[in-house]
Amino acid sequence: MSNVLTKLPTSNVSPRLAVIGGGISGLTAAYRLRQWLPRAEIELFEAGDRLGGVLHTRRDQGLLIECGADSFFNQLPAAVELCQELGLGEEIIPTNEEPRRALILHAGKLHRVPEGFVQMRPEKVGPMLRTRLLSWRGKLRLLAERWATSPTELANEDFDESVASFATRRLGREVFERMVQPLLAGVYTADPYRLSVAATMPTAFEAERKYGSLIAKVMADRKQASRDSGARYGSFVTLRNGMAQLIDTLVSQLNDVKIHLNTPIKNLTPTADQRWSVSQASGNETLVDGVIVALPAPRAGALLASTDAELSNKLQNIAYASSAVAVLVYRREQISDPLDGFGMVVPTVEGRQIVAASYSSVKFPGRAPADQVLIRVFVGGALQPELLERSDAEIVQLAQAELSDILGIRGEPLRAELVRWNEKMPQYHVGHLQLVDRIEDLVSKHVGLELAGNAYRGVGIPQCVQQANSAARRLAESFDLPSPSEG
Ligand SMILES: Cc1cc2nc3c(=O)[nH]c(=O)nc-3n(C[C@H](O)[C@H](O)[C@H](O)COP(=O)(O)OP(=O)(O)OC[C@H]3O[C@@H](n4cnc5c(N)ncnc54)[C@H](O)[C@@H]3O)c2cc1C
């Protein structure tokens, strides 16, 4: 999509524009506006003291520590294309060849995710039958997926249900509890009883609608499926010097976009002459012709409270979960586990206090000195928010204790620290797609206003880049930029 976008002719008009939020969404939006409206006066407002939002890399003593996001999916092209445009194509690196797999904790032991279990679809029967993650009863129930009945409401285009409901009725409770729940929690840190299957697992959802069952869909495109299977963990890439390399390069190419750090925006209101008043918490005001709001949805909603009550309420209805990442570094010899994967996810039914752990230095090269292991442990999320009320030291301590028990670690870590991400992960609850349709409808009634960010149509970095591209394109086109068909 961005290929099409970058071919758009640039325009000579010189509007005054604002972007609110300096995460990957806001920075991408500002970059595109600069590209397509080179004469525009653009200002970017960021509440914090640094740019990048959830993308934050620290380097220290031979370690490359990703505090937040550490990689992105390369099968959705927007993020890869952005990197290439920025001259970072050669800097994109894949995960290490071995051991390209994820592990799931079951009864205190780590097991490989059966090969071919992708997006809830069991693409290979053999590995599903051999796995020790499931009992024979669970395996038979999984095979019976072919004959599980579908609810009559499925025919309704707007039908949605929770991931828990969908996975349990199609694949059985064991597969849901031992595989689907932890794998999804590793991405969304979500409550599967509230998470929308239509918004988060559209491929599986559509498979039932079109083919009557997930297994029938696998059989229908077996050729394609066998080509794709196992490739999933090879589809995550990062930048040699970490996600900060993307942020730093993007910022360096914003040219004369005026960046205001430590500048939280409090209000966004339309003026009588069809402009927007952007009010800072300090009371300063900037008048602009167009604005892209790239904030977590509840913050965006708060800014628009006096502009559009329904839009503001709908935005504030999108819930967010918090999490914390305990960064632990050990000498390799302290760990008896073979670390036979890129990390583990921990099912709720295991009764543990961690959601997942990513073995960063096993996953990507150059993350730690050769004799050390860097592990990031995820705590909290929608299912255990109470753990985040504890102090940093207590959370690090519990992460350390869980990890030592599971991986057989002896002694204290060489380094241990905590990063908190408060209200950073949107929760796409049942009905999310209809909610977003309505939000987009309401936004379209306000000339010069656009939204971008992870709250709407995908939380991953490629989806954020793509949504920012689209928001910038709509805004640029509203200032007479010729449409692609004219260009
Ligand atoms: C811990 C964690 C790990 C993740 N890992 C991955 C991963 O590996 N791969 C992947 O693809 N995705 C990952 N994600 C998801 C992805 O990183 C995020 O969805 C994405 O980075 C969000 O970017 P954003 O710009 O929309 O929002 P944010 O990064 O949240 O940026 C919003 C910015 O707005 C600023 N702001 C807030 N209020 C105001 C205000 N009033 N005025 C001005 N500025 C304001 C904030 O300070 C922030 O800088 C992860 C998410 C989390 C939380």
Image: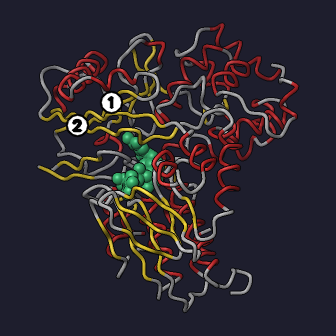
Q: Is residue 309 left or right of residue 171?
A: left
Identify the residue position indicated by label 1 in the image.
339
Residue 238: tell me if it is visible. Answer: no
Q: Compare marks 2 and 1 and give the one earlier in the sequence.
A: 1
Q: Secondary structure at mark 2?
A: strand
- The amino acid pointed to by label 2 is Val
Q: Position of residue 309 (x, y in %)?
A: 60, 48
Q: Is residue 271 left or right of residue 360?
A: right
Q: Position of residue 76 (x, y in %)?
A: 58, 56
Q: How is the image coloured?
A: secondary structure
- The amino acid pointed to by label 1 is Leu
Q: Secondary structure at mark 1?
A: loop
Q: Quadrant of residue 68?
A: top left
Report the residue at 27% width, 24% height from top.
399
Q: Quadrant of the N terminus?
A: bottom right
Q: Position of residue 207 (x, y in %)?
A: 77, 37
Say above or below: 473 vs 345: below
Number of numbered discs present? 2
Identify the residue position indicated by label 2 in the image.
373
Q: Are marks 2 and 1 in contact (CB under 8 Å)?
A: yes
Q: Is residue 393 left or right of residue 255?
A: left
Q: Residues within 10 Å of mark 2 (few under 14, many from 20)?
A: many
Task: Say which of marks 2 and 1 sits in front.
Answer: 2
Q: Quadrant of residue 409?
A: top left
Residue 304: tell me if it is visible. Answer: yes
